């Protein structure tokens, strides 16, 4: 494994013509930064509610959903006007959420009330709630829509919600303080990061059992500083990227062998990530340094840093 320094930053290069728009929630500014995917510069700033964290796009790409955690709301931003048009009834202290493949069911983790709230987006109504573990955070929905999963930070479990039964039907024990969950494109695997455990669990979705636990080691960095948070998988099954929090690196994992290939040095306290639609570019939010790192996926190198607001948290890429 080799540790890469982002020397290409000096060149100011952008990875191969990845167009589109990148939206970044700034936790301490109550804003969303809008980055142009061509120039890789901030071109606009959207005012939103207090402490914006998780963000995701609507299925048609016309709206952006934002967890305004301190306002106890999920705000809906119209991307044509860049204005908040209404709030969804999110439950208390929403942090992360996941949109069902049908585009209308939004599964929201309510960290302080130990439930998952499911909202029907078009009618703006809560359809049901499910009790889960203590401090729920991570949310994911399987590609076929059968499963919604939640990670509970204090219970150290993944909770499997059957979306037809509208109930939790199974639990998987993982490492300490699980923060993020994501399904592989084929739905066969679930990857879950454990911040305090310092690991990522690979779970077989059919059996709901952990098949591999991946650890990380970085020369010169204390083990307790390696805190996995955001995870992104490429659609072709080639790579898994893991944000390592205050270790200030992104781990690159061979998604087939589950071996760590290398580490990429990014900004301070890397938190969440998202891939461009063409899968050629990865964007990371670096909370303490207040910027976004731009990673060329083919070259596995950091090619640019974009300054955004204070404490960038979530990121969503359109196009």
Image (tube, helix red, strand yellow):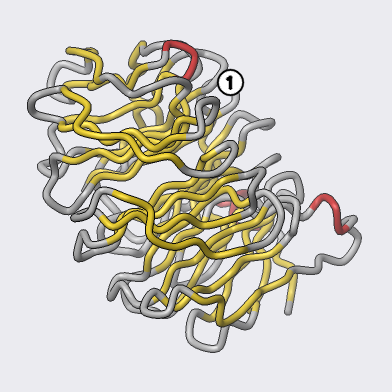
Residue 80 visible to an observer of this rendering: yes
Residue 12 visible to an observer of this rendering: no
In which image quadrant can residue 162 be found? bottom left
Point out the image quarter for the N terminus: bottom right
Q: Position of residue 266 (x, y in %)?
A: 65, 50
Q: Residue at x 52, y 31 (%)?
A: 111
Q: Residue at x 50, y 70 (%)?
A: 240
User: In this figure, what is the number of numbered marks?
Assistant: 1
Q: Is residue 187 toward the left or the right of residue 119 in the image?
A: right
Residue that badge 1 annotates? 310
Location of residue 91 with respect to 238 vertically, above or below: above
Q: Position of residue 121 (x, y in %)?
A: 15, 30
User: Crowding near pointer 1: few (<14 within 10 Å), some, many (20+)?
Assistant: some
Closer to the camera in the image, 292 or 50? 50
- In the orientation shown, which residue stands out farthest toward the bottom? 257
Location of residue 169 with respect to 71 vertically, above or below: below
Location of residue 8 with respect to 47 vertically, above or below: below
Q: Residue at x 58, y 56 (%)?
A: 157
Closer to the camera in the image, 142 or 267? 142
Q: Residue at x 25, y 34 (%)?
A: 128
Closer to the camera in the image, 229 or 298? 229
Closer to the camera in the image, 193 or 208? 208
Q: Position of residue 123 (x, y in %)?
A: 8, 24
Q: Secondary structure at mark 1?
A: loop
Q: Is residue 15 toward the left or the right of residue 287 in the image?
A: left
Q: Position of residue 125 (x, y in %)?
A: 17, 23
In which image quadrant can residue 4 be found? bottom right
Q: Is residue 102 toward the left or the right of residue 72 in the image?
A: left
């Amino acid at each position: 494994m080799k540790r890469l320094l982002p020397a290409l930053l000096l060149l100011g290069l952008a990875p191969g013509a990845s167009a589109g728009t990148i939206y970044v929630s700034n936790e301490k500014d109550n804003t969303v930064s809008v980055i142009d995917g061509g120039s890789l510069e901030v071109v606009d700033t959207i005012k939103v509610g207090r402490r914006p964290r998780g963000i995701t796009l609507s299925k048609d790409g016309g709206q952006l959903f934002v967890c305004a955690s301190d306002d106890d709301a999920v705000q809906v931003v119209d991307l044509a006007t860049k204005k908040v048009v209404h709030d969804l009834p999110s439950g208390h202290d929403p942090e992360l959420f996941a949109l069902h493949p049908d585009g209308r069911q939004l599964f929201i983790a309510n960290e302080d009330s130990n439930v998952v709230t499911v909202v029907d987006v078009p009618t703006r109504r809560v359809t049901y709630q499910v009790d889960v573990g203590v401090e729920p955070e991570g949310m994911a929905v399987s590609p076929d829509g059968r499963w919604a999963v939640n990670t509970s930070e204090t219970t150290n479990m993944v909770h499997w919600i059957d979306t037809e039964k509208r109930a939790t039907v199974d639990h998987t024990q993982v490492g300490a303080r699980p923060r993020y969950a994501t399904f592989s494109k084929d739905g066969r695997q679930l990857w879950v990061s454990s911040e305090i455990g310092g690991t990522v669990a690979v779970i077989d979705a059919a059996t709901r059992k952990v098949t591999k636990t991946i650890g990380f080691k970085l020369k010169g960095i204390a083990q307790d500083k390696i805190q996995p948070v955001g995870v992104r998988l490429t659609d072709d099954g080639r790579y898994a990227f893991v944000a390592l929090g205050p270790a200030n690196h992104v781990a690159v994992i061979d998604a087939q062998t589950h071996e760590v290939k290398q580490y990429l040095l990014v900004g301070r306290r890397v938190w969440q990530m998202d891939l461009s639609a063409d899968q050629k570019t990865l964007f990371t939010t670096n909370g303490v340094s207040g910027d976004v790192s731009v990673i060329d996926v083919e070259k596995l190198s950091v090619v640019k840093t974009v300054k955004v607001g204070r404490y960038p948290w979530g990121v969503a890429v359109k196009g």
